[in-house]
Image (cartoon, rainbow, N blue to C red):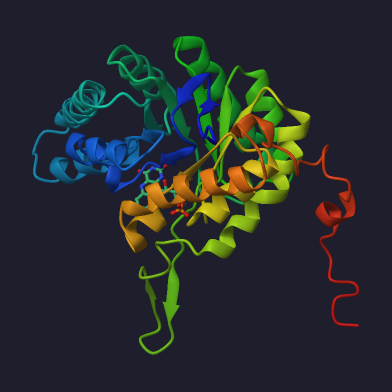
C-alpha cells in the first residue's frame, strides 16, 4: 500500500493536494465537500484589506460627514473579519483536515490584527498573500522586499500557529527571498501566486479583463527549477507548489522537485472536484510502480542536490536548441 500522507508546515495531511485560496474555499459546505473528495488541506479565500477599504470608500461617497470615513472603514473591516472568523470556526467544525487562513493586507497594523484573530478563531496555519504591484519606478526592489519581510517578521512574532508566505514569481533572486522568509520564522512558502493579467482587445482598442483567469499545466514549469533549488538548500522550509498543477503527473513532478504539497485551483474549475481523488489515485499508483512506500521516500529525488545532471536545471538560454 502506498502511503500518500505528507506533512506541510508541521501539519499532518492525509494527502498532498491542498485546495488553494479561491471561491472553492469560501464557504463551509464547499470545504466539507473538498475534504470528502480527498483534499489534504484547504486554504481559505483570502481576506483582502484592499477590498474592505474599497467597500468603505464607496459608502463614504454617500455620506456628508467626512468623520464617517474612519468609522466606516473600521465597521466594514470588522464585519468582513467577523465573517472570516465564522468561516474558520465553521470549517474547523466540519472537517478533520487542516484549515489554513489567508490574509492579504497592505497596511502594517491590520496584518497583525487579522493574523492574531484568525489564529485565535482556530486556523491551523496562516498563509500570507503578500504582493504589492509596483507602479512607482522610484521604489527599489530592495525597499519592496524589506516591506514584505517586515510583515513576515511581525506576523510570525504575533502568532504561534505556523505561517507560510505565498510568493509571486517575479523576484530577481527567489532563493534569497525564500531564505529571508525562513530566517523570519515562516515554516513554508507557496510557489507561486498567479496574478490576474489584463489583455488588449485590438478591435475595440480597450483593455479587457477576460485574460487567463485559469492556469495552463505548462505553467507548472515556472516552479520546478526554483522548488528544486530551494528545497535542497532550505530543507526545513516546506514548499507547496501552486500554479499549473492540474493532474497526478503534475503533482508527482512537484514532489520530485522537493515540494511537500501542491495547491490546486484551476483544475477544479476545469475538471470538477473529482480531480482531487484522481490526483491522489495517480500518485498512489505511481508510487507502487516505482516501489516508493511513502511520499518522503521519493520527495526531492530530483531536487538540485540529488539530481545528477545539474546542467539540466542550470540551462536557461537557447544556445544550441535550433542549431
Ligand atoms: C477565481 C480565483 C480566485 C482566487 N482567489 C485567491 C485568493 O483570494 N487568494 C489567493 O491567495 N489566491 C487566489 N487565487 C489564486 C489561486 O489560489 C492559485 O494560486 C492560482 O489560481 C494558481 O493555481 P492554479 O494553477 O491551481 O489555478 C484565486 C484564483 C482564482 C482562479
Q: Vertical placement of 244 versus 147: above or below?
A: below
Q: Between residue 22 and residue 74, name the one nearer to us.
A: 22
Residue at figure coordinates x 43%, y 58% from the top left: 196
Q: Quadrant of residue 230?
A: top right
Q: Between residue 236 and residue 107, name the one nearer to us.
A: 236
Residue 211, given in percent of the width and then of the height, sits at 41, 69
Q: Tell me the quarter of the image containing the C terminus.
A: bottom right
In this rendering, would 228 be left or right of 238? right
Q: Vertical placement of 227 versus 206: above or below?
A: above
For the question of whether residue 134 can be seen, the reply is no
Residue 71, given in percent of the width and then of the height, sits at 17, 25
Q: Report the residue that reaches farthest toward the front.
A: 1
Residue at figure coordinates x 31%, y 51% from the top left: 273
Q: Vertical placement of 313 versus 132: above or below?
A: below
Residue at figure coordinates x 43%, y 25% from the top left: 126
Residue at figure coordinates x 68%, y 37% from the top left: 298
In this rendering, would 274 be left or right of 147? left
For the question of whether residue 9 can be seen, the reply is yes
Count of numbered circles in the view: 0
Residue 313, given in percent of the width and then of the height, sits at 81, 52
Q: Quadrant of residue 321?
A: bottom right
Residue 304, given in percent of the width and then of the height, sits at 80, 41
In this rendering, would 109 be left or right of 235? left
Q: Quadrant of residue 117?
A: top left
In this rendering, would 33 be left or right of 292? left
Q: Between residue 278 and residue 300, name the one nearer to us.
A: 278
Q: Vertical placement of 232 versus 272: above or below?
A: above
Amino acid at each position: 500500500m502506498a502511503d500518500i500522507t505528507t506533512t506541510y508546515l508541521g501539519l499532518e495531511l492525509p494527502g498532498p493536494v491542498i485546495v488553494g485560496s479561491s471561491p472553492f474555499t469560501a464557504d463551509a459546505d464547499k470545504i466539507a465537500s473538498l475534504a470528502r473528495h480527498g483534499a489534504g488541506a484547504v486554504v481559505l479565500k483570502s481576506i483582502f484589506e484592499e477590498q474592505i477599504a474599497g467597500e468603505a470608500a464607496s459608502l463614504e461617497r454617500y455620506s456628508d460627514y467626512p468623520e464617517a470615513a474612519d468609522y466606516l472603514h473600521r465597521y466594514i473591516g470588522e464585519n468582513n473579519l467577523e465573517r472570516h472568523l465564522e468561516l474558520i470556526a465553521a470549517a474547523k467544525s466540519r472537517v478533520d483536515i487542516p484549515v489554513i487562513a489567508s490574509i492579504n493586507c497592505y497596511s502594517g497594523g491590520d496584518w497583525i490584527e487579522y493574523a492574531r484573530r484568525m489564529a485565535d478563531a482556530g486556523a491551523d496555519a496562516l498563509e500570507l498573500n503578500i504582493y504589492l504591484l509596483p507602479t512607482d519606478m522610484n521604489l527599489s526592489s530592495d525597499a519592496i522586499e524589506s516591506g514584505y519581510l517586515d510583515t513576515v517578521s511581525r506576523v510570525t512574532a504575533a502568532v504561534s500557529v505556523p505561517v507560510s508566505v505565498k510568493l509571486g514569481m517575479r523576484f530577481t533572486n527567489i532563493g534569497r527571498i525564500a531564505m529571508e522568509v525562513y530566517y523570519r520564522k515562516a515554516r513554508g512558502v507557496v510557489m507561486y501566486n498567479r496574478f490576474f493579467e489584463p489583455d488588449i482587445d485590438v478591435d475595440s482598442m480597450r483593455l479587457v479583463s477576460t485574460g487567463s483567469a485559469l492556469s495552463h499545466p505548462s505553467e507548472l514549469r515556472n516552479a520546478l527549477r526554483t522548488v528544486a533549488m530551494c528545497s535542497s538548500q532550505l530543507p526545513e522550509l516546506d514548499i507547496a507548489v501552486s500554479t499549473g498543477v492540474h493532474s497526478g503527473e503534475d503533482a508527482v513532478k512537484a514532489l520530485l522537485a522537493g515540494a511537500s504539497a501542491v495547491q490546486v485551483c484551476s483544475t477544479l474549475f476545469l475538471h470538477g472536484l473529482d480531480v482531487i481523488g484522481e490526483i491522489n489515485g495517480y500518485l498512489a499508483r505511481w508510487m507502487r510502480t516505482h516501489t516508493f512506500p511513502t511520499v518522503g521516500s521519493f520527495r526531492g529525488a530530483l531536487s538540485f542536490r540529488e539530481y545528477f545532471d545539474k546542467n539540466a536545471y542550470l540551462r536557461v538560454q537557447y544556445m544550441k536548441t535550433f542549431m
